[in-house]
């Protein structure tokens, strides 16, 4: 044997190598492959779960944006409604103040007219009394006051 290889040793080594391969295949290679497959499955599940969470986060963000837009629109509507209500209240208050002022002016007119009528009545009464007193002094005798008053009222009415 020129190369230092003996056939029996070579066959024993080949048999040992094949036995080692069979043992490693059943006890090491299959469990390692199974572990690698399990790990690949877990990684795939994790990636799928991350994608689901990412999609859910994106969906939640879209819903949040929609709700914010809706809330903003509602807020604008509330502000607009409050402004309209305030404007209406201001107009109502102005109208009520205007009506109240007109009522006060009308009340003042009525009061002035009443006072004027009373004053004119009092002046007529005093004028009539003064005229009767003056006529008595001029004539020297007393006239019937009621007759004299009727004459004075007639003269005043004709001159008015």
Image: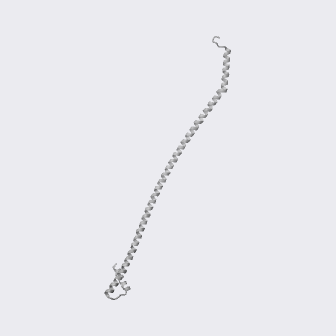
Quadrant holding the C terminus: bottom left
Residue 24: image location, x then y, percent = 66, 25
54 lies above or below 116: above
Compared across the picture, whether 95 is left or right of 9 comes to left
107 lies above or below 158: above
Residue 117: image location, x then y, percent = 38, 76
Compared across the picture, whether 18 is left or right of 55 comes to right
Q: Residue furthest top?
A: 2
The total number of labels drawn is: 0
158 lies above or below 80: below
- At 49% from the left and 51% from the top, the residue drawn is 75
- At 43% from the left and 66% from the top, the residue drawn is 100
Judging depth in this view, the residue of 135 and 150 nearest the camera is 135
Q: Quadrant of residue 101?
A: bottom left
- At 42% from the left and 68% from the top, the residue drawn is 104
- At 37% from the left and 85% from the top, the residue drawn is 145
Q: Residue furthest left?
A: 138
Compared across the picture, whether 81 is left or right of 152 comes to right
Quadrant holding the N terminus: top right
Q: Residue furthest bottom?
A: 141
Judging depth in this view, the residue of 68 and 104 nearest the camera is 104
Residue 108: image location, x then y, percent = 40, 70
């Amino acid at each position: 044997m020129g190369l230092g290889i003996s056939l029996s040793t070579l066959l024993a080594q080949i048999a040992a190598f094949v036995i080692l391969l069979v043992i490693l295949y059943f006890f090491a290679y299959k469990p390692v492959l199974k572990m690698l497959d399990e790990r690949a499955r877990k990684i795939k599940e994790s990636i799928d779960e991350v994608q689901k969470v990412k999609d859910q986060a994106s969906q939640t963000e879209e819903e949040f944006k929609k709700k914010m837009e809706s809330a903003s629109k509602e807020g604008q509507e509330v502000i607009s409604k409050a402004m309209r209500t305030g404007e209406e209240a201001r107009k109502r208050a102005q109208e009520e103040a205007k009506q109240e002022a007109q009522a006060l002016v009308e009340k003042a007119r009525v009061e002035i007219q009443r006072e004027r009528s009373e004053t004119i009545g009092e002046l007529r009464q005093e004028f009539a009394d003064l005229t009767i007193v003056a006529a008595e002094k001029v004539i020297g005798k007393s006239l019937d006051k009621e007759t004299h008053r009727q004459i004075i009222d007639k003269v005043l009415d004709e001159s008015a």
